[in-house]
Image (cartoon, rainbow, N blue to C red):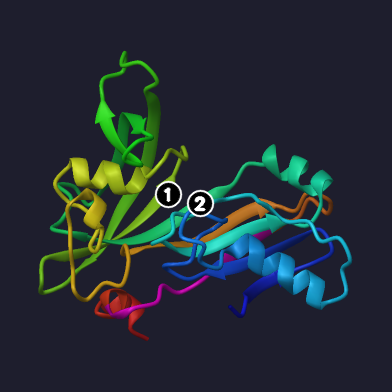
Amino acid sequence: MKLNILYEDKNLIVCFKPSGVPSQSDKSFDTDMVSAVLLYERENGVKEPYCALINRLDKPVMGIVLMAKNKKTAALLSNTDFKKEYLAVVSGCPLQNSGEYRDFLVKDGRTNTSKVTGKNTPNAKEAVLEYEVLETDDNERTLVKIRLITGRHHQIRVQFAHRGTPLCGDTKYGMEDRKCNGVALCAYRLTFLHPYRHEEMSFEVKPQGEIFENFKLLSD
């Protein structure tokens, strides 16, 4: 797999992860982003390459991933605040044009799913996001911009499905779509302070796939 590198220096690397590619090794044995970066480093003469994934994306989700090239950078980035923004295509339309979703989620490790539950449920964790409706097409699909406040397991997918607007192509949470290869979710913008230069770094990508290209905002 050829890496789509958005930025690189001696301490970190920012790449675009396509839908269907694992962020790190899993049971499928498909080529993952961490392994691809390690191979890339070896091919460029690094004898003992190191790669730590900083922001993990689900396998069917595309978007920007950040990885550290050494342990010190990984430690510094683990204490860094990130602004994570997503574009999603949902079935139907949220009741309001913008707002906040605040729930408590519990992960089921057996099924690798999460669900909305009560605040006092054992192991429940608060999940918060902000969203804005951008555009609705002729097929009752809606393009939504999302800012993650917390980073829970399958958070965006679960919170939108819970409100009757599941992400297109998300078969795990009840929404198939033939026009969607994977889940219609893209981590399209990532902003953070560089751990050494302390400068704001901001990266943005355009979602790929027919499901996104149907919207005028993304068709140019």
Where 37 falls versus 219 (above or below)?
above
Q: Is residue 213 magenta?
A: no
> Image height check: is 173 above or below 113?
below
Q: Position of residue 41 (x, y in %)?
A: 78, 70
Residue 208 located left or right of residue 44 = left
Point out the residue furthest to the bottom here: 220
Q: Is residue 2 visible?
A: yes
Q: Are marks 2 and 1 in contact (CB under 8 Å)?
A: yes
Q: Residue at x 26, y 20 (%)?
A: 118
- To which residue does mark 2 refer? 84
The answer to which of marks 2 and 1 sits earlier in the sequence is: 2
Q: Is residue 46 left or right of residue 21?
A: right
> Looking at this rendering, what residue extends furthest in the top direction?
120
Name which residue lies at 54% across and 49% down: 83
Q: Residue 210 placed where, x, y %?
A: 28, 80
Q: Nearer the viewer, residue 123 or 14?
A: 123
Amino acid identity at mark 1: Arg
Q: Residues within 10 Å of mark 2 (few under 14, many from 20)?
A: some
- Describe residue 52's horizontal placement relative to residue 18 as left or right: right
Count residues near mark 1 (Cα–Cα under 10 Å), then give few for <14, some for 14-19, many for 20+: some
Residue 207 belongs to the span the image colors magenta: yes
Q: Position of residue 30 (x, y in %)?
A: 50, 66
Give the extent of the magenta segment: 201-210
- The residue that label 1 is drawn on is 147
Q: Quadrant of the N terminus?
A: bottom right
Query: Which amino acid, by three-letter code, is at mark 2?
Result: Lys
| Placement of 75 over or under 11, stated as above or below | above
How far apart in space, not on screen, are marks 2 and 1 (Cα)? 6 Å
Task: Provide residue 184's location: percent of width, then percent of height.
Answer: 31, 64
Query: Does dot 1 land on a helix, a strand or a loop?
Result: strand
